[in-house]
Amino acid sequence: MSALHPDLKRVILSTEEIQTRVKEIARQIEHDYADAERVILIGILKGAFIFLADLSRELNIPHTVDFMSVSSYGDAAVSNGAVRLILDLRKPIKNEHVIIVEDIVDTGSTLQYLYNTLKLRKPASLRTCSLFQKKRESKDVPIDYKGFELPDVWVVGYGLDYADTHRTLPYVAELRAEVYE
Ligand code: PRP
């Protein structure tokens, strides 16, 4: 691998580790939805677009993708947990099998908001999938398909960003504290 970008302290998850786990999650979903006519994967922009692209191409069952975008109120660092909808789905999800696909669950506010919002639309089933979860206290919202737990440091890559940078790295790395302090 070429030298790490100077903003980065260390690689936490390699490309190979991530790709292996994405395949495992796809196999789990295929198993769980073997009898479903189709599944709708809902990617949460922006962070989930890379995971969603890899997961959906790995998935050997009928499925479609759609997207939502949400934002925390105020400065993320002092967020009170309130979330607002920026971009909604193109189509209704009533009677559909739906999986919310996130890159990361941190406080859990976003996933909780999305789960509650989509549940009201009466899907046939609603599950949650997040490739990463920060190891810290988070809201009690179940993650049905979880890839990895990450330390409570600033992580970038594979969809995760720092001020929109480093998002498209194929691995996950820890950002040096000097960069954001
Ligand atoms: C990240 C991530 C989740 C959310 C999780 O999105 O993609 O949607 O934060 O945080 P929470 O569990 O504390 O609610 P972000 O707001 O950074 O937007 P982005 O995906 O567009 O970068």
Image (tube, grey):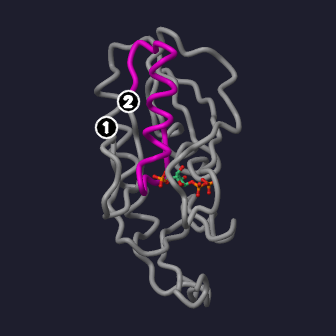
Q: Name the residue under label 1.
A: 144
Q: In this view, does 120 lie to the left or right of 71?
A: left
Image height of 2 relative to 27, above or below: below
Image height of 80 relative to 170, above or below: above
Asked if residue 104 lies in the magenta stretch, the reply is yes
Q: Residue at the location (43% across, 57% down)? A: 106
Q: Mark 2 points at which residue?
A: 127
Q: Residue at the location (61% across, 90% down)? A: 6
Image height of 2 relative to 101, above or below: below
Circles 1 and 2, Cβ within 8 Å, touching? The answer is yes
Task: Give percent across and percent down for residue 163.
Answer: 68, 69
Q: Residue at the location (58% across, 42% down)? A: 44
- In the image, the segment drawn in magenta is 101-127
97 vs 62, nearest the viewer: 97
Amino acid type indicated by mark 2: Arg
Asked if residue 126 lies in the magenta stretch, the reply is yes
5 vs 160, nearest the viewer: 160
Residue 125, located in which quarter of the rendered image? top left
Task: Identify the element where label 1 is drawn.
Answer: loop
84 vs 114, nearest the viewer: 84
Q: In this view, does 95 lie to the left or right of 75?
A: left
